Image (cartoon, helix red, strand yellow):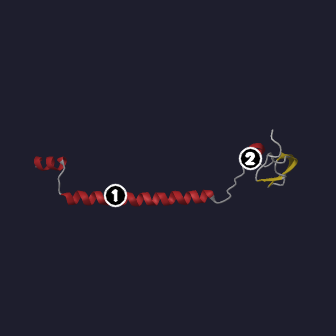
Amino acid sequence: MKAEIHPKYHTDCKVVCACGNTYVTGSILPEIRVDVCSKCHPFYTGKEKFIDTEGRVERFKRKVDVATKVQQERSAKLAKKVEVKEVASGVKSLKDLLKEASK
């Protein structure tokens, strides 16, 4: 291995969790701060804990609502276009011609 190219390794790295739990491990950083650890993670505790840090659920619901509204507006415009086109064209369908012929 080449000398002096590797980072300094700290054998007494302190890991601090948001729940207050701390433990010591080895790392190239002298201290690490984490949001979730084995003491507070739902997988290890068996308790469900919902963490919505930036209102992601609300933001997603707003996006879905906007997309639905835009899709409905486009569908209405398309239906209007088709209706206007059918009325303006004056061309009769085969069904209409057959109805007229049977009269």
Q: Amino acid at mark 1?
A: Leu
Position of 96 relative to 55 (above/below):
above
Which residue occupies 10% across, 47% down?
A: 101
Residue 46 % position (x, y): 75, 44
* Viewer-closest of 13 and 66: 13
x and y percentages locating residue 50 in the rendered image? 69, 53
> Which residue bears the numbered disc 1?
78
- The residue where tag 2 is placed is 42
User: Which residue appears farthest toward the right when viewing the image?
Assistant: 12
**Mark 2 and mark 1: Cα distance apart in space:** 49 Å
Instruction: Locate residue 73, reporting x and y percent.
Output: 40, 61
Quarter assignment of residue 20: bottom right
Q: Is residue 6 above or below residue 66?
A: above
Q: What's the residue at 83%, 53% (across, down)?
A: 31
The label shown at residue 54 is none
Residue displayed at 74% across by 43% down: 43
> In terms of image quadrants, where is residue 18?
bottom right
User: What element does badge 2 sit on?
Assistant: helix
